[in-house]
Image: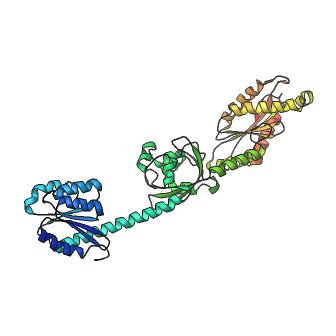
Amino acid sequence: MNKYTDTVTILYVEDEQDILDGYAKALSRISKKLYTASNGLEGLELYKKYLPNIIVTDIQMPIMNGIDMAKKIKEIDADANIVFTTAHSESAYLLEAIELHVEGFLLKPVQKKSLQTLIQKLSYRIMLEKQNKEQRDILQYIIDSENSITVITDTTNISFVSTSFLNFFCVSSIEEFHTKFYTFLDIFNNENNIINKENILQNIRNGKDFYDCIQAIDETLRVVKLKNSKNIYKSFFINVSKINDINYLINFTDITKLSQEKEATEKKVYKDSLTGISNREKFEEVFEYELTQSKRYNRKFSLVILDIDHFKKFNDMFGHLIGDEILTILSQSIEQNKRESDFFARWGGEEFVILFTNTNLEIATKLTENFRKIIQNIQHKSAGKVTASFGLSSYKKGDTKESIFKRADEALYEAKHSGRNCLRSVV
């Protein structure tokens, strides 16, 4: 035996006893365990009992021939390693034998050296397949032991997944996954702010590697919301490693509970307790991010400061509770009518701010004028009509937070001194 054959088991089937005895002796020297049978039926029963790695069989035999035995074995294991020994007179069986996709044919009388060489070749392949399976089983065990989702993919097709991945997407196999999601990238819905399918595909079209796309994002922002086929959302932190030029190892760590706690904390920290909209602290954070993006990508955004007209009179005449009601009604009116991309917050007192992302002065003017009309139509049951004045400015190259706010504030001052309930802008 050698390092390739000392772990394989062989089933040898031959109806001629003297040939069986002669070759069995040779095969027993290169196999861990040898089973012998004198016909196909006997050979089939031994196969079912011991599941040997390699089957060497004659074709023409009594009771059950080698072809029929091989068919039965292939029904049990389509990858079974079968070698036929055949005589010239058995050529009628040859086509049927070829269709079984067996591992080889040896012409009788079989040269023992040829048989040993073929057995060693098959043994080496079996050993490699076993090692690969063991490695994959170990990898699968390690991955399945972690509370995360792991995928190996080229961003289109998936070659390996953790059981948790299949469970999350409610599928039993990679094949079933691809019937529900055309490609791997389909899991990134466009509801995610940064890491979404549209952004990823745009970067790839621009020649950027998927790994580089994710690495370019600040670690604190590498969070995606994934939705399974039952419409259940969970938040995951994504980490990507390159295996080679084509494949990536992607790990999703479930941070749903952490995200929910973070959102609850942010709601307390960043929400205005009276109106329920975002407060000044949250607005400043969003503003700084938008300013950075605009400088990097040379895109426009616009800022509005609005102030409720004669708000002090409301408080003095009707009391602070009515004043609070007006603040809340106005806040909800704007919040319900703004675009999804707009950011609205209470700046302090009766002042509010609106950030129009990726919006130039012309469009921002139309949007702001619409808000002015919405507020003008507010009719409080006690205080009556409500109006507001608006100051607008738009980002230009070289701007800072202070310079943009200064222009918007100047525009607001001009609106108030132009009769109120109007919009003014300073470029």
Q: Position of residue 403 (x, y in %)?
A: 76, 46
Q: Residue furthest right?
A: 316
Q: Please name the residue shown 76% across and 45% down the image.
A: 268
Where residue 34 sits, quadrant-wise, is: bottom left
Q: Is residue 329 above or below residue 14?
A: above
Q: Please name the residue shown 20% across and 75% down the image.
A: 26
Q: Is residue 17 above or below residue 266?
A: below
Q: Position of residue 66 (x, y in %)?
A: 17, 59
Q: Position of residue 159 (x, y in %)?
A: 42, 55
Q: Is residue 95 above or below residue 307?
A: below
Where residue 358 sits, quadrant-wise, is: top right
Q: Position of residue 424 (x, y in %)?
A: 77, 33
Quarter of the picture containing the C terminus is: top right
Q: Please name the residue shown 26% across and 61% down the image.
A: 47
Quarter of the picture containing the N terminus is: bottom left
Pick the front one: 125 or 23 = 23
Pick the front one: 114 or 75 = 75
